Amino acid sequence: MQLWADDKLLVLASRSEARHAILRAAEIPHEVEPADLDEREIERRAAAGDAGEAAALLAQEKALAVASRRPGALVLGADQTLALGSRRFAKPSDRAAAREQLLTLRNRTHELHSAITLARDHNVLFEHRDVARLTMRAFSEEFLDRYLDIAGVGAMASVGAYQLEKAGVQLFENIEGDHFVILGLPLFPLLRFLRERAYLLS
């Protein structure tokens, strides 16, 4: 028996394997259609230093872009930004950039801002954003190089150059915040909205 009560699948406007896995584990049937937008240009439109606003704007733009080409579909846009003080980080372009990011974050506390938007056609139906605070431990450079060997291309797939659900958890000494926010998809607010609108059984 399914918990999803609508006759159409949710559309996830993101390539993120972590978001796909979260929805799959929560028994939310969906398909994936990335928005393929210029994310750096969208980030520049957010207020300087406001990582939460940047994440929210990215999530909204992704949802609306895919919704505009999928009439009648319920589209979920999601994004995540990382801030260390007033400095925002993007996904590293290569191993050297990943190493530099992790050395910058080492032994310091940074924030992950995660945002979601649900849209249909040209209308935003729901938006939510949240933040988690993560403190990296004072790891050695030998550990860092071995971690990057293990992470491989995964270090370039996530902002901050780590995936907490994998070996990246060993970079940290403390985490404050919701696990799903850290993975880039605030799940509980999403589930509440879907139940309220009868997309999920309540």
Image (cartoon, helix red, strand yellow):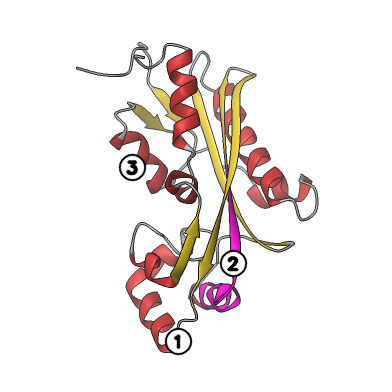
How far apart marks 1 and 2 lie (CA) works out to: 17 Å
Element at label 1: loop
Residue 12 image-quadrant placement: top left
Question: Looking at the picture, which amino acid does disc 3 mark?
Answer: Ala
Q: Nearer the viewer, residue 64 or 53?
A: 53
Q: Residue at x 32, y 26 (%)?
A: 29
Q: Which residue is mark 2?
A: 109
Q: Nearer the viewer, residue 92 or 186?
A: 186
Q: Which residue is mark 1?
A: 140
Give the residues drawn in magenta, as a range. Answer: 98-114
Ranked by sequence position, the earlier of labels 3 and 1 is 3
Q: Residues within 10 Å of mark 1 (few under 14, many from 20)?
A: few
Residue 17 visible from this viewpoint:
yes
Which tag is nearer the camera, tag 2 or tag 3?
Answer: 2
Where's the C terminus, which quadrant?
A: top left
Rendered view: 39 above or below 144: above
Q: Residue at x 45, y 69 (%)?
A: 172
